[in-house]
Image: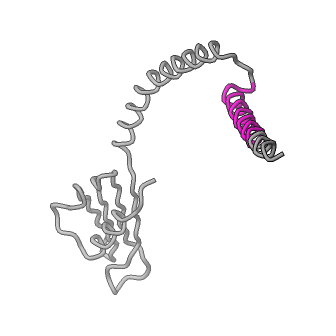
Amino acid sequence: MAMGYPFFILLGLFAVSWAIGAWHIACLQKKVRKLYGGAEIPGDDMRAEIVRRLARLDAQLEDLQPRLAHAERIADASLHKIGFVRFNPFQDTGGDNSFILILLDSENTGVMVSSLFAREGVRIYGKAIERGRSKHQLSQEEKTALEATMNKKVG
């Protein structure tokens, strides 16, 4: 009787191990079926199907690379940050009729357009911005607007 007890323990451990293994295999088979859209694919056919899918994906990737390069060139040349501020630079005029418009790309290069409204008329100034700096002197309002525009998050 003493010899039979360890045998049943080992038999029980074997049965539990077999059940866990069967459960893992079933989970893996379920994942493989899900990967292949529910189709049951035998071993050798599965390898062939994987090779076919990889070849198809590689061809799609080759088709997408020139399109991505083109989209990146367009994105580099496009506006990423736009700032607009209305203000009143003179005490003797009413309302915020003056404005600053800033158009920048991802590298903070672009243009600043300032319009100053006064009783005598309107003056418009255009200033190039290269990497966040202008070769022309900026008013305090322009500096503040430029800084706020540059600090905008892209995307």
Residue 120 within the magenta-colored segment of the rendering: no
Dominant SS type (magenta): helix
Q: In percent of the image, x 74 and y 38: which residue is there?
A: 14
**Residue 146, relative to residue 50: is it above or below?**
below
**Residue 48, relative to residue 150: is it above or below?**
above
**Residue 9, relative to residue 150: is it above or below?**
above
**Residue 100, relative to residue 38: is it above or below?**
below
Q: Which residues are magenta?
A: 13-38
Q: Position of residue 87 (x, y in %)?
A: 38, 76
Colouring rule applied to residues? one colour
Q: Position of residue 19 (x, y in %)?
A: 77, 38
Q: Which one is in front, 124 or 24?
A: 24
- Determine the image quadrant of residue 50: top right
Q: Quadrant of the N terminus?
A: top right
Is residue 118 rendered to the left or right of residue 153? left
Q: Which one is in front, 20 or 33?
A: 20
Is residue 91 rendered to the left or right of residue 95? left
Name, please, the residue furthest toward the left.
Answer: 135
Q: Position of residue 68 (x, y in %)?
A: 42, 32
Name, please, the residue furthest toward the bottom.
Answer: 91
- Determine the image quadrant of residue 10: top right
Q: In percent of the image, x 78 and y 43: which residue is there?
A: 3
Q: In percent of the image, x 36 and y 64: which residue is there?
A: 149
Q: Position of residue 28 (x, y in %)?
A: 68, 33
- Determine the image quadrant of residue 12: top right
